[in-house]
Amino acid sequence: MKVIGFAGYSGAGKTTLVERLIPVLRLLGQRVSVVKHAHHKFDIDHPGKDTFRHREAGAFEVVVASDKRLALMREFERPTELGVHALIAELDHGVDWVLVEGFKHSDLFKIEVFRAPAEGEAPRPARYLEDAFVVGIATDDPARLPRPTELPIFDLDDVDGIGDWLLRHAERFDYKVDHHG
């Protein structure tokens, strides 16, 4: 299993990049999973549904499954921030790639998604200047990066190029399960 993160500020284009990269990797014969960091109040369930009613009644976990998919919902009794490695451990380890969106402070290799600020917008600091785990930059405007870099720079829209680069350097992204516990 290979793991690569995508980190950047809200609105930079992380979700769109990951969404567009999944079918590129699939067409190259790769099985892909995604781990996404969400805001603390997110929910995938809806009032009135059986699973929602079970959770509201106090179930710690609800697993719902069909012949097409499985979903596990777990309620934490107190706020619990699971680390990215704990979330990766929950996945089927038979996938080829895990794309991690968010978790910008993780110790995973990641591609920084950097969008130049709009007119009048304050610039946001770039992670690649201080984060040794940033191995590439996907950007809409390489000329507006804060400082030159030796890291690979990708056009934000070049998902084919990013997918090709990932496969050419796949061994670099091998996930060592025992290293992370």
Image: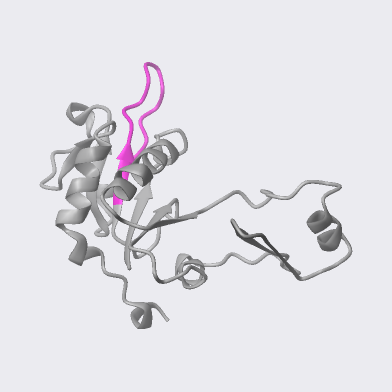
**Residue at the extreme left:** 150
Q: Indicate left or right for 30 with 59 as reference.
A: left
Query: What is the total number of numbered labels drawn onto the structure image?
Result: 0
Q: Position of residue 127 (x, y in %)?
A: 31, 48
Q: Position of residue 33 (x, y in %)?
A: 43, 57
Q: Residue at x 83, y 56 (%)?
A: 50
* Boundaries of the magenta span: 111-126
* Residue 118 located within the stretch drawn in magenta: yes
Residue 53 vs residue 138, the one in the foreground:
53
Residue 51 vs residue 18, the one in the foreground:
51
Q: Position of residue 163 (x, y in %)?
A: 24, 46
Q: Residue at x 82, y 50 (%)?
A: 49
Quadrant location of residue 114? top left
Residue 146 makes an appearance in the image: no
Residue 80 makes an appearance in the image: yes
Quadrant location of residue 14? top left
**Residue at the extreme right:** 57
Q: Position of residue 94 (x, y in %)?
A: 39, 70
Q: Residue at x 68, y 49 (%)?
A: 44
